[in-house]
Structure formats: C-alpha cells, structure tokens
Amino acid sequence: MRNHLSIINSTGISLKEKYQSDDRLTKYIEDLDSERQNMVAAVELINVLRADTDDVGFRMKKIYLKDLFYKIKKKIEIEFEGRLSNIYIKIEEGKQRLFVNGIPYLIEKIFINLIKNSIESVLSKSNKKGVINIELNVDENDKNKVLINIKDNGLGFVDKDGNKLSDEKIKECVRATYTTKTADTSKPNKGIGLF
C-alpha cells in the first residue's frame, strides 16, 4: 500500500511542477494529494490498531531510549535537509540508562511526529532559532516508569491562523486523526502525533 501511495505522491509532485501555471489543474492535483494524505493516515492508523499482531516489525522489544532518540534525530536531520541549522536538538539522559518495552516502529513513529511538531512550531516563529530539549528520566514517584519530556521554544499549540489553542482544544489534540494544520499544506498531516 505504501509503495502505491509513494508513486501517487511522486506523480502528483511532477504534475504540480509541470502544470503550475494552470490554476484549475493545480487545484485538482492538490485535491488528489489531500486524499492521498487521508489514505496515508488511514494506513498509519491501521498499523497502530493492529500492533498486537505477530508481524516481525510489530514484536515487543526492549528499547534503549537514548539510542532510539539519536536514531530519530538522525532521521529528522536527513528529512529536513539542512533546514535545522538554527535549531538545536538536545538529548539528555538522567543518571541511569533507561529502557522501555515496546514496539520499536510504533514508538519511533510517535516521537518522530512529536519532534516534527516541535520543529514546525520553532520554524514558524519569526526568528526561526530554537532549541528542542528531550529529557529522559526515571519517574521519582514510580521507579518502574520513565518520563520523556520534549520541550521547545516554539509557538506552542496554535490553530491554522496562529492563534493559541484553548485548553479544551488542546485536549482534542490526542484524538485520532485530529490536526490543527490545514489540508492544503504541502506536508502530509495525519493527526496521529499525539494519538
């Protein structure tokens, strides 16, 4: 399914570049891309919901968090291709090595989405300089739990017009497929980052 969606995406990009002077055709291409994004979101949601299957990529494993976040940082740096020169991503681990049991693919996907949200928030600021701190610690109240804090100096939770979200709207952000971003953006927004 993903291969088909990738082909649709590549074809859409090519058509958009070729017919950029034709507003009517460009609108149709953007509508198709919006539907493609919805299909990507559906595939991601299906993957999350079927995570308890015995597929090779969906087996529970012991995950060293610091290594996971450095792997995520590297993937994000590759994806953003030099646009992070004014953003410093800092990863700090407490006094001990922290491990969790989980499905690596899904945990990685969740944190990639959260960190991308932080990056977009920082990039949307006028000065475009920022810091994203990822702190990994043991919960002082329950030593069997870890705390993962991702903090940035971006705009925070804002709507498509840049207005701060109310506490009520922020609570909606954890609902599956909810997004504060507009559908006509060039980036696919699946609404699963906080789900």
Image (cartoon, rainbow, N blue to C red):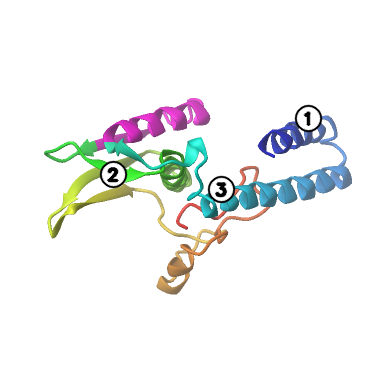
- Which kind of residue does numbered mark 3 sit on? Asn
Pointer 3 residue: 47
Left-right relation of 150 to 111: left
Classed neighbour count for the residue bearing mark 2: other residues with Cα under 10 Å, few (<14), some (14–19), many (≥20): some
Q: Position of residue 159 (x, y in %)?
A: 53, 61
Residue 184 at x, y percent in the picture: 69, 51
On screen, residue 30 versus residue 119, left or right, reads: right
Residue 35 in the image: x percent, y percent?
Answer: 74, 51
Q: Residue furthest bottom?
A: 168
Q: Which residue is drawn at the image coordinates 62% and 50% (left, top)?
A: 41
Amino acid carrying label 2: it is: Val
Dot 1 crowding, Cα within 10 Å, few <14, some 14–19, many 20+ = few
Give the residue number, with chain letter if any, for mark 2: 100
Q: Which residues are magenta?
A: 66-91
Relative to 14, residue 145 above or below: below
Q: Position of residue 118 (x, y in %)?
A: 41, 46
Question: Horizontal placement of 84 versus 66: left or right?
Answer: right
Q: Is residue 83 magenta?
A: yes
Q: Is residue 59 above or below residue 82?
A: below
Q: Residue at x 55, y 61 (%)?
A: 178
Question: In the structure shown, which secondary structural element does the residue marked by tag 2 occupy?
Answer: strand
Q: Amino acid at mark 1?
A: Ser
Earlier-in-chain disc, 3 versus 2:
3
| Real-space CA distance between mark 1 and mark 2, rounded to the nearest whole angstrom | 42 Å
The residue identified by callout 1 is 14
Task: Name which of mark 1 and mark 2 comes first in the sequence.
Answer: 1
